[in-house]
Amino acid sequence: MLRTPRTQLLAVAAAASLALSLAACGGGGKSDGPAEDPDEIVLSLVPSGDVDSITQSAKGLESYLSDKIGVPVRAEVTESYAAAIVAMKADQAQVAMLGPVGMVQAQDQAGAVPVLQSVRFGSGTYHTQWFTNDPKTYCADEVKVVEGFKYCNGTDAAKTGPAGEAALAKIKAGSSIAFVDQGSASGYYYPATQWGQVSGGDPLVDLDAQFAGDHDAAVLAVARGDYPVGVSFDDAREEVAADEPKVASDVVVFAYSTEIPNDGIVVSGSVSKELRTKMTDAFTSMAKDPKGLKTLEAVYEIEGLEKVDTAALKKAKSVEENFGE
């Protein structure tokens, strides 16, 4: 069962209460004195797909980073972006790999420092794809098949977004949408904002938002007919097509969002500047090392890391602020 905004908020509140209780019991709360670096670094990861797969791939991160930093690194896969941020706020995590909205939230709510951003396909940006199992409603032209997957409204040829967004006006108020996570940029913030801009509606009130938990699950929810429309990063269909034939046969991409800054890495503001530099250098070195890069690709399909784009993150922050607290 997918999560509604209400159940998601209750889960976040519970996670926040737990983390704050741990901090109050001496779990590493911030102090006014000089930074005292931990004996172990906890790296928070948020699953974009199969949890077991990312957990296994994360072992390579632990080994490489521990060796380069000189401090043991332990990766923890959290249930959501919000949980990862709460863990950092409570000093239960010292570094996290988050989406762009998660990065600005970690900066605002936990005092984290954004240090690096991912590169994929030679770009520092990406976009949401909107997909459907009802092309008669959402496709204004003929469905085209490219490398085994279906597209319409010009998305087959578009390299960047937005594309096909006029079709979003066909998503009526009250429609159930398979979003990803309430803290996901491509899986909620950007597409919900885009629908509001195109339709004139209020996505927080007018859409029946259902949260799948990860991008794979959102694709599968539409492929199996649970919901008529869903969103994910482009192209999450590749991750699950082998396991569910309906992904290729029934799921049609009909629109793209505007471009979104890639995910990246944030470091806790509670660690010393020296340790923050070591962590940043370790990730940078990893992206330049063939074996290290292979691990980054296995975890989040990262092809490189570059200095954080503060201007792009400011734009992400402006999108996030439209959703309030």
Image (cartoon, rainbow, N blue to C red):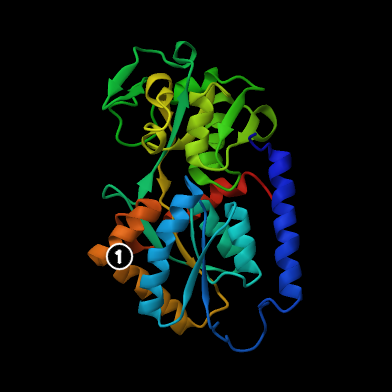
Locate residue 325 relative to residue 120 in the image: left or right. Answer: right
Report which quarter residue 8 is drawn in: top right
110 w.r.t. 221: above or below: below
* Secondary structure category for the residue under label 1: helix
Q: Give the amino acid type for the residue marked by disc 1 in the picture.
A: Gly
Circle 1 residues within 10 Å: few <14, some 14–19, many ≥20: many
For the point 40% across and 79% down, the residue is 69
Image location of residue 325, percent across then percent down? 69, 51
Please name whichever residue, 21 or 115, is drawn nearer the observer in this view of the structure: 21
255 w.r.t. 12: above or below: above
Please name whichever residue, 182 or 161, is drawn nearer the observer in this view of the structure: 182
Image location of residue 47, percent across then percent down? 50, 50
For the point 36% across and 20% down, the residue is 152
For the point 76% across and 74% down, the residue is 24
Residue 278 seen from this side: yes
Image location of residue 289, percent across then percent down? 25, 67
Report which quarter residue 78 is drawn in: bottom right
Badge count: 1
Locate residue 184 relative to residue 32 in the image: left or right. Answer: left
According to the picture, the residue beneath numbered tag 1 turns out to be 292
Please name whichever residue, 154 or 25, is drawn nearer the observer in this view of the structure: 25
